[in-house]
Image (cartoon, grey):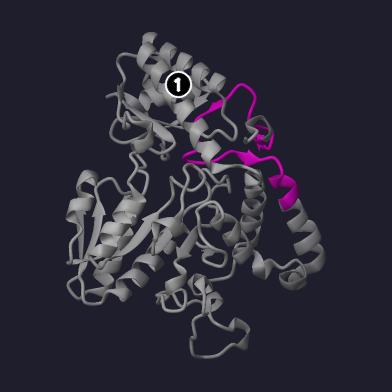
Protein backbone atom coordinates (compact mmCIF):
# COMPACT_ATOMS: atom_id res chain seq x y z
CA UNK A 1 0.00 0.00 0.00
CA UNK A 2 1.40 3.39 -1.00
CA UNK A 3 2.20 5.69 1.93
CA UNK A 4 0.88 9.07 0.80
CA UNK A 5 1.90 10.74 4.06
CA UNK A 6 5.49 10.03 3.02
CA UNK A 7 5.07 11.31 -0.54
CA UNK A 8 3.42 14.50 0.75
CA UNK A 9 6.63 15.38 2.61
CA UNK A 10 8.51 15.34 -0.70
CA UNK A 11 6.79 18.53 -1.90
CA UNK A 12 7.03 22.17 -0.93
CA UNK A 13 3.44 23.11 -0.03
CA UNK A 14 2.99 26.70 1.23
CA UNK A 15 1.52 26.89 4.71
CA UNK A 16 -2.21 27.61 4.71
CA UNK A 17 -2.68 26.99 0.98
CA UNK A 18 -4.94 24.24 -0.35
CA UNK A 19 -3.51 23.35 -3.75
CA UNK A 20 -5.98 21.69 -6.12
CA UNK A 21 -4.27 22.66 -9.35
CA UNK A 22 -1.67 19.93 -9.82
CA UNK A 23 -3.51 19.05 -13.03
CA UNK A 24 -2.13 22.31 -14.43
CA UNK A 25 1.20 22.72 -12.61
CA UNK A 26 2.55 20.35 -10.00
CA UNK A 27 4.14 21.78 -6.83
CA UNK A 28 7.87 22.10 -6.29
CA UNK A 29 9.63 18.90 -5.22
CA UNK A 30 11.66 19.63 -2.08
CA UNK A 31 14.75 17.97 -3.57
CA UNK A 32 14.69 20.09 -6.74
CA UNK A 33 16.58 23.05 -5.29
CA UNK A 34 19.52 20.94 -4.14
CA UNK A 35 19.61 19.08 -7.45
CA UNK A 36 19.68 22.28 -9.49
CA UNK A 37 22.39 23.68 -7.24
CA UNK A 38 24.43 20.52 -7.80
CA UNK A 39 24.07 20.78 -11.58
CA UNK A 40 24.94 24.48 -11.54
CA UNK A 41 27.95 24.35 -9.26
CA UNK A 42 29.47 20.85 -9.21
CA UNK A 43 28.63 19.92 -12.78
CA UNK A 44 28.40 23.02 -14.99
CA UNK A 45 30.53 25.14 -12.64
CA UNK A 46 33.34 22.71 -11.87
CA UNK A 47 33.26 20.33 -14.80
CA UNK A 48 32.27 22.79 -17.51
CA UNK A 49 31.77 21.17 -20.90
CA UNK A 50 33.26 17.93 -19.60
CA UNK A 51 29.97 17.34 -17.75
CA UNK A 52 28.32 16.14 -20.95
CA UNK A 53 30.39 12.99 -20.37
CA UNK A 54 31.48 13.06 -16.73
CA UNK A 55 27.98 13.84 -15.42
CA UNK A 56 26.33 12.04 -18.35
CA UNK A 57 24.22 14.99 -19.37
CA UNK A 58 23.97 13.45 -22.81
CA UNK A 59 22.19 10.41 -21.38
CA UNK A 60 19.57 12.34 -19.38
CA UNK A 61 16.84 12.29 -22.06
CA UNK A 62 17.00 8.50 -22.34
CA UNK A 63 17.23 7.87 -18.57
CA UNK A 64 14.34 10.20 -17.78
CA UNK A 65 12.36 8.72 -20.67
CA UNK A 66 12.73 5.25 -19.22
CA UNK A 67 11.54 6.49 -15.81
CA UNK A 68 8.43 7.99 -17.38
CA UNK A 69 7.97 4.82 -19.41
CA UNK A 70 7.54 2.80 -16.23
CA UNK A 71 4.55 5.00 -15.31
CA UNK A 72 2.80 4.63 -18.66
CA UNK A 73 3.35 0.98 -19.49
CA UNK A 74 6.08 1.60 -22.05
CA UNK A 75 9.04 -0.76 -22.45
CA UNK A 76 12.58 0.42 -21.82
CA UNK A 77 14.00 2.44 -24.69
CA UNK A 78 10.64 3.49 -26.15
CA UNK A 79 10.25 6.98 -24.62
CA UNK A 80 12.33 10.04 -25.45
CA UNK A 81 12.20 13.38 -23.61
CA UNK A 82 12.96 16.95 -24.62
CA UNK A 83 11.33 19.87 -26.41
CA UNK A 84 7.73 20.92 -25.75
CA UNK A 85 4.50 18.98 -26.02
CA UNK A 86 3.57 20.91 -29.16
CA UNK A 87 6.78 19.72 -30.83
CA UNK A 88 6.11 16.15 -29.77
CA UNK A 89 2.53 16.26 -31.10
CA UNK A 90 3.91 17.55 -34.40
CA UNK A 91 6.49 14.76 -34.56
CA UNK A 92 4.09 11.96 -33.61
CA UNK A 93 1.35 13.07 -35.98
CA UNK A 94 3.75 13.52 -38.89
CA UNK A 95 5.28 10.08 -38.32
CA UNK A 96 1.84 8.49 -38.03
CA UNK A 97 0.61 10.11 -41.25
CA UNK A 98 3.71 8.88 -43.09
CA UNK A 99 2.71 5.31 -42.17
CA UNK A 100 -0.63 5.73 -43.99
CA UNK A 101 0.22 7.77 -47.12
CA UNK A 102 -2.88 6.52 -48.96
CA UNK A 103 -5.29 8.04 -46.42
CA UNK A 104 -6.25 11.67 -45.86
CA UNK A 105 -8.16 12.05 -42.58
CA UNK A 106 -6.85 12.94 -39.13
CA UNK A 107 -9.70 12.24 -36.72
CA UNK A 108 -9.92 14.13 -33.46
CA UNK A 109 -12.66 15.44 -31.18
CA UNK A 110 -13.97 18.78 -29.98
CA UNK A 111 -12.81 18.01 -26.45
CA UNK A 112 -9.18 17.84 -27.49
CA UNK A 113 -6.79 20.47 -26.22
CA UNK A 114 -6.86 23.31 -28.77
CA UNK A 115 -3.07 23.34 -29.11
CA UNK A 116 -3.15 19.77 -30.46
CA UNK A 117 -5.70 20.87 -33.04
CA UNK A 118 -3.63 23.92 -33.96
CA UNK A 119 -0.60 21.71 -34.51
CA UNK A 120 -2.62 19.27 -36.59
CA UNK A 121 -4.09 22.05 -38.72
CA UNK A 122 -0.69 23.64 -39.30
CA UNK A 123 0.90 20.32 -40.24
CA UNK A 124 -1.94 19.47 -42.61
CA UNK A 125 -1.63 22.84 -44.33
CA UNK A 126 2.13 22.40 -44.67
CA UNK A 127 1.89 18.88 -46.08
CA UNK A 128 -0.99 19.59 -48.46
CA UNK A 129 -2.15 16.70 -50.58
CA UNK A 130 -5.80 16.90 -49.57
CA UNK A 131 -5.30 16.02 -45.91
CA UNK A 132 -8.24 16.81 -43.63
CA UNK A 133 -8.69 17.35 -39.90
CA UNK A 134 -12.08 15.90 -39.02
CA UNK A 135 -13.57 16.88 -35.65
CA UNK A 136 -16.45 15.07 -33.97
CA UNK A 137 -17.99 15.18 -30.52
CA UNK A 138 -16.07 13.07 -27.97
CA UNK A 139 -18.94 10.58 -27.75
CA UNK A 140 -18.83 10.09 -31.54
CA UNK A 141 -15.17 9.15 -31.91
CA UNK A 142 -15.65 5.37 -31.92
CA UNK A 143 -18.43 5.48 -34.51
CA UNK A 144 -16.43 7.88 -36.70
CA UNK A 145 -13.42 5.61 -37.17
CA UNK A 146 -13.61 4.13 -40.65
CA UNK A 147 -11.27 3.20 -43.51
CA UNK A 148 -10.85 6.84 -44.56
CA UNK A 149 -9.03 7.64 -41.30
CA UNK A 150 -5.24 7.69 -41.40
CA UNK A 151 -4.64 8.75 -37.80
CA UNK A 152 -6.67 9.24 -34.65
CA UNK A 153 -5.33 12.13 -32.56
CA UNK A 154 -6.99 11.84 -29.15
CA UNK A 155 -6.28 13.25 -25.70
CA UNK A 156 -7.20 10.50 -23.26
CA UNK A 157 -8.50 12.83 -20.53
CA UNK A 158 -10.42 15.97 -21.51
CA UNK A 159 -8.64 19.02 -20.13
CA UNK A 160 -11.94 20.79 -19.37
CA UNK A 161 -14.15 18.19 -17.73
CA UNK A 162 -11.87 15.22 -17.11
CA UNK A 163 -13.96 12.99 -19.40
CA UNK A 164 -11.85 9.91 -20.14
CA UNK A 165 -11.68 8.03 -23.42
CA UNK A 166 -11.27 4.24 -23.45
CA UNK A 167 -7.75 4.01 -24.88
CA UNK A 168 -7.72 0.27 -25.40
CA UNK A 169 -11.13 0.13 -27.09
CA UNK A 170 -10.49 3.08 -29.39
CA UNK A 171 -7.04 1.80 -30.32
CA UNK A 172 -8.52 -1.58 -31.18
CA UNK A 173 -11.22 0.08 -33.29
CA UNK A 174 -8.62 2.21 -35.09
CA UNK A 175 -6.38 -0.75 -35.84
CA UNK A 176 -9.31 -2.77 -37.14
CA UNK A 177 -9.97 0.05 -39.60
CA UNK A 178 -6.30 0.26 -40.56
CA UNK A 179 -5.65 3.59 -38.78
CA UNK A 180 -2.68 4.63 -36.62
CA UNK A 181 -3.19 6.06 -33.12
CA UNK A 182 -1.61 9.08 -31.44
CA UNK A 183 -2.54 9.54 -27.78
CA UNK A 184 -1.97 12.71 -25.76
CA UNK A 185 -1.36 11.79 -22.11
CA UNK A 186 -1.03 15.35 -20.75
CA UNK A 187 -3.79 14.75 -18.18
CA UNK A 188 -3.15 11.01 -17.81
CA UNK A 189 0.51 10.42 -16.98
CA UNK A 190 0.82 10.31 -13.21
CA UNK A 191 -2.94 10.73 -12.78
CA UNK A 192 -4.47 7.46 -13.95
CA UNK A 193 -3.04 4.03 -14.72
CA UNK A 194 -1.78 3.97 -18.31
CA UNK A 195 -0.56 0.87 -20.12
CA UNK A 196 0.49 1.74 -23.64
CA UNK A 197 1.72 -1.79 -24.28
CA UNK A 198 -1.53 -3.46 -23.23
CA UNK A 199 -3.52 -0.89 -25.22
CA UNK A 200 -1.30 -1.56 -28.27
CA UNK A 201 -0.91 2.19 -28.80
CA UNK A 202 1.24 3.34 -31.71
CA UNK A 203 2.39 6.78 -30.57
CA UNK A 204 1.86 8.77 -27.38
CA UNK A 205 3.00 12.16 -26.14
CA UNK A 206 2.66 14.07 -22.91
CA UNK A 207 3.88 16.90 -20.74
CA UNK A 208 5.61 16.52 -17.38
CA UNK A 209 4.77 19.72 -15.52
CA UNK A 210 1.34 18.58 -14.34
CA UNK A 211 1.04 15.33 -12.36
CA UNK A 212 4.74 14.49 -12.84
CA UNK A 213 5.76 17.77 -11.12
CA UNK A 214 8.65 18.62 -13.43
CA UNK A 215 8.18 22.38 -13.12
CA UNK A 216 6.94 25.12 -15.49
CA UNK A 217 8.03 24.40 -19.04
CA UNK A 218 9.38 20.97 -18.12
CA UNK A 219 10.36 18.80 -21.12
CA UNK A 220 7.71 16.75 -22.85
CA UNK A 221 7.95 13.10 -23.86
CA UNK A 222 7.14 10.98 -26.88
CA UNK A 223 6.49 7.24 -27.05
CA UNK A 224 6.98 5.21 -30.22
CA UNK A 225 5.80 1.60 -30.20
CA UNK A 226 8.82 -0.69 -30.61
CA UNK A 227 7.42 -2.01 -33.90
CA UNK A 228 7.90 1.46 -35.40
CA UNK A 229 11.13 2.38 -33.63
CA UNK A 230 13.34 1.98 -36.70
CA UNK A 231 10.80 3.12 -39.30
CA UNK A 232 8.94 6.12 -37.85
CA UNK A 233 9.89 9.12 -39.95
CA UNK A 234 11.30 12.01 -37.86
CA UNK A 235 9.93 15.08 -39.63
CA UNK A 236 12.25 17.22 -37.49
CA UNK A 237 15.55 15.58 -38.37
CA UNK A 238 17.60 17.23 -35.67
CA UNK A 239 21.18 16.74 -34.62
CA UNK A 240 20.41 14.67 -31.54
CA UNK A 241 18.17 12.34 -33.54
CA UNK A 242 21.06 11.37 -35.80
CA UNK A 243 22.47 7.87 -35.59
CA UNK A 244 25.93 9.30 -34.81
CA UNK A 245 25.60 13.02 -33.99
CA UNK A 246 29.29 13.48 -33.28
CA UNK A 247 30.34 11.99 -36.60
CA UNK A 248 29.11 15.29 -38.07
CA UNK A 249 27.97 13.69 -41.29
CA UNK A 250 26.42 16.04 -43.81
CA UNK A 251 23.66 13.54 -44.52
CA UNK A 252 21.02 12.70 -41.93
CA UNK A 253 20.76 9.10 -40.79
CA UNK A 254 18.05 8.59 -38.14
CA UNK A 255 18.84 6.68 -34.98
CA UNK A 256 17.54 3.12 -34.99
CA UNK A 257 15.34 3.69 -31.93
CA UNK A 258 13.00 6.27 -30.38
CA UNK A 259 16.15 8.39 -30.06
CA UNK A 260 15.39 9.52 -33.62
CA UNK A 261 12.63 11.65 -32.09
CA UNK A 262 15.15 13.76 -30.24
CA UNK A 263 15.74 17.10 -31.92
CA UNK A 264 18.13 19.60 -30.37
CA UNK A 265 20.44 19.91 -27.38
CA UNK A 266 18.84 18.50 -24.20
CA UNK A 267 17.63 21.08 -21.63
CA UNK A 268 19.90 19.79 -18.88
CA UNK A 269 18.66 21.94 -15.99
CA UNK A 270 15.02 21.18 -16.73
CA UNK A 271 15.70 17.48 -17.17
CA UNK A 272 17.59 17.38 -13.87
CA UNK A 273 14.56 18.84 -12.06
CA UNK A 274 12.24 16.38 -13.78
CA UNK A 275 14.58 13.52 -12.91
CA UNK A 276 14.49 14.35 -9.20
CA UNK A 277 10.72 14.96 -9.34
CA UNK A 278 10.27 11.41 -10.58
CA UNK A 279 11.89 10.15 -7.38
CA UNK A 280 8.51 10.73 -5.72
CA UNK A 281 7.11 7.80 -7.71
CA UNK A 282 9.54 5.26 -6.28
CA UNK A 283 7.43 2.63 -4.56
CA UNK A 284 4.16 4.26 -5.62
CA UNK A 285 1.51 1.94 -7.04
CA UNK A 286 -0.64 3.64 -9.71
CA UNK A 287 -3.58 1.49 -8.65
CA UNK A 288 -3.32 3.07 -5.19
CA UNK A 289 -3.07 6.54 -6.76
CA UNK A 290 -6.18 5.90 -8.81
CA UNK A 291 -8.19 4.56 -5.87
CA UNK A 292 -7.18 7.51 -3.69
CA UNK A 293 -7.90 9.98 -6.48
CA UNK A 294 -11.42 8.61 -6.85
CA UNK A 295 -11.99 8.83 -3.08
CA UNK A 296 -10.82 12.45 -3.03
CA UNK A 297 -12.82 13.55 -6.06
CA UNK A 298 -15.98 11.76 -4.96
CA UNK A 299 -15.77 13.36 -1.52
CA UNK A 300 -15.21 16.79 -3.07
CA UNK A 301 -18.19 16.43 -5.41
CA UNK A 302 -20.43 15.34 -2.56
CA UNK A 303 -19.30 18.23 -0.36
CA UNK A 304 -19.68 20.84 -3.10
CA UNK A 305 -23.10 19.65 -4.22
CA UNK A 306 -24.31 19.69 -0.61
CA UNK A 307 -22.92 23.14 0.08
CA UNK A 308 -23.10 24.99 -3.27
CA UNK A 309 -26.40 24.49 -5.09
CA UNK A 310 -25.58 27.19 -7.66
CA UNK A 311 -22.74 25.10 -9.12
CA UNK A 312 -23.38 22.42 -11.74
CA UNK A 313 -21.15 19.40 -12.12
CA UNK A 314 -19.59 19.44 -15.61
CA UNK A 315 -17.49 16.30 -15.20
CA UNK A 316 -18.80 12.76 -15.68
CA UNK A 317 -20.71 11.51 -12.66
CA UNK A 318 -19.10 8.09 -12.95
CA UNK A 319 -15.58 8.36 -11.45
CA UNK A 320 -14.31 5.63 -13.79
CA UNK A 321 -15.33 7.77 -16.78
CA UNK A 322 -13.14 10.71 -15.76
CA UNK A 323 -9.49 11.33 -14.99
CA UNK A 324 -8.21 12.92 -11.79
CA UNK A 325 -9.93 16.29 -12.12
CA UNK A 326 -13.40 17.71 -11.52
CA UNK A 327 -15.06 20.77 -13.01
CA UNK A 328 -18.17 22.74 -12.09
CA UNK A 329 -20.03 25.28 -14.20
CA UNK A 330 -21.19 28.74 -13.23
CA UNK A 331 -21.70 31.91 -15.34
CA UNK A 332 -19.35 33.76 -12.96
CA UNK A 333 -16.76 30.98 -12.95
CA UNK A 334 -13.77 33.23 -13.44
CA UNK A 335 -14.66 35.55 -10.55
CA UNK A 336 -15.47 32.59 -8.32
CA UNK A 337 -12.05 31.08 -8.93
CA UNK A 338 -10.31 34.39 -8.25
CA UNK A 339 -12.16 34.70 -4.96
CA UNK A 340 -11.16 31.15 -4.08
CA UNK A 341 -7.52 31.84 -4.85
CA UNK A 342 -7.65 35.00 -2.75
CA UNK A 343 -8.81 32.74 0.09
CA UNK A 344 -5.94 30.30 -0.39
CA UNK A 345 -7.73 27.58 -2.36
CA UNK A 346 -6.00 27.27 -5.70
CA UNK A 347 -7.72 25.72 -8.70
CA UNK A 348 -8.12 27.27 -12.12
CA UNK A 349 -10.65 28.47 -14.67
CA UNK A 350 -11.32 27.27 -18.21
CA UNK A 351 -13.48 29.26 -20.59
CA UNK A 352 -16.27 29.79 -20.88
CA UNK A 353 -17.59 28.92 -17.40
CA UNK A 354 -15.63 26.10 -15.75
CA UNK A 355 -13.93 26.11 -12.36
CA UNK A 356 -11.52 23.18 -12.34
CA UNK A 357 -9.87 21.19 -9.57
CA UNK A 358 -7.21 18.47 -9.67
CA UNK A 359 -6.84 15.62 -7.17
CA UNK A 360 -3.32 14.41 -6.58
CA UNK A 361 -3.01 11.88 -3.75
CA UNK A 362 0.76 12.26 -3.59
CA UNK A 363 0.19 15.43 -1.57
CA UNK A 364 -3.59 15.94 -1.08
CA UNK A 365 -5.65 14.46 1.74
CA UNK A 366 -9.38 14.06 2.32
CA UNK A 367 -9.16 16.77 4.97
CA UNK A 368 -7.75 19.11 2.33
CA UNK A 369 -10.60 18.61 -0.11
CA UNK A 370 -13.25 19.02 2.59
CA UNK A 371 -11.59 22.24 3.75
CA UNK A 372 -11.48 23.47 0.15
CA UNK A 373 -15.20 22.76 -0.27
CA UNK A 374 -15.94 24.76 2.87
CA UNK A 375 -14.07 27.76 1.49
CA UNK A 376 -15.95 27.40 -1.80
CA UNK A 377 -19.21 27.37 0.16
CA UNK A 378 -18.26 30.66 1.82
CA UNK A 379 -17.30 32.20 -1.52
CA UNK A 380 -20.73 31.28 -2.88
CA UNK A 381 -23.02 31.96 0.10
CA UNK A 382 -21.37 35.28 0.97
CA UNK A 383 -20.98 36.20 -2.71
CA UNK A 384 -17.32 36.94 -2.16
CA UNK A 385 -16.83 36.54 -5.90
CA UNK A 386 -19.04 39.60 -6.54
CA UNK A 387 -16.14 42.03 -6.38
CA UNK A 388 -15.06 44.01 -9.47
CA UNK A 389 -11.44 43.10 -8.75
CA UNK A 390 -12.21 39.45 -9.42
CA UNK A 391 -13.80 40.15 -12.81
CA UNK A 392 -10.62 41.51 -14.39
CA UNK A 393 -9.00 38.64 -16.23
CA UNK A 394 -5.30 37.97 -15.95
CA UNK A 395 -3.28 36.75 -18.93
CA UNK A 396 -3.18 33.24 -17.47
CA UNK A 397 -6.47 31.84 -16.16
User: Percent x, y for residue 6?
Assistant: 69, 33
Nearer to the camera, 312 or 299: 299
User: Residue at the location (32% across, 75% down)?
Assistant: 99
User: Residue at the location (28% across, 34% down)?
Assistant: 352
Outermost residue on the top side: it is 382
* Magenta span contains residue 293: no
Q: Quadrant of residue 379?
A: top left
Q: Which residue is mark 1?
A: 299
Q: Quadrant of residue 57?
A: bottom right
Q: Quadrant of residue 340?
A: top left
Residue 226 shown left or right of residue 276 in the figure: left
Residue 30 shown left or right of residue 362 in the figure: right
Residue 32 shown left or right of residue 321 in the figure: right
Could you tell me how many numbered marks the image carries? 1
User: Residue at the location (40% across, 36% down)?
Assistant: 397
Answer above or below: position of 29 versus 312: below
Rate crowding at label 1 as few (under 14), some (14 to 19) or many (20 or more) other CA atoms within 10 Å: some
* Magenta span contains residue 26: yes
User: Percent x, y for residue 283?
Assistant: 65, 44
Q: Which quadrant does the N terminus fall into?
A: top right
Dot 1: element: helix
User: Percent x, y for residue 169?
Assistant: 31, 52
Does residue 31 appear in the picture of this structure? yes
- Tell me the magenta residue range: 7-35
Answer above or below: position of 34 versus 119: above
Outermost residue on the bottom side: it is 250
Does residue 151 appear in the picture of this structure? no
Answer above or below: position of 210 versus 153: above
User: Percent x, y for residue 39?
Assistant: 74, 58
Amino acid sequence: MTDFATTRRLFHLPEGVLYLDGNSLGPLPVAAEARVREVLTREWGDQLIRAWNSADWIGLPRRVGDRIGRLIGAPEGSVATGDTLSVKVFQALAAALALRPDRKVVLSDTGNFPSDLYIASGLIQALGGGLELRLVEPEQVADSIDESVAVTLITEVDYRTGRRHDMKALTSKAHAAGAVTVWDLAHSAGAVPVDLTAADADFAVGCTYKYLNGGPGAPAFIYVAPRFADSARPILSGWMGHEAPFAFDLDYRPHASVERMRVGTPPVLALAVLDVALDAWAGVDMADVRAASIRLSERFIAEVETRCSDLTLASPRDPHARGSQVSFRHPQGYAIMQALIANNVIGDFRAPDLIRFGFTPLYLSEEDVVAAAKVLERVMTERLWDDPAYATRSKVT
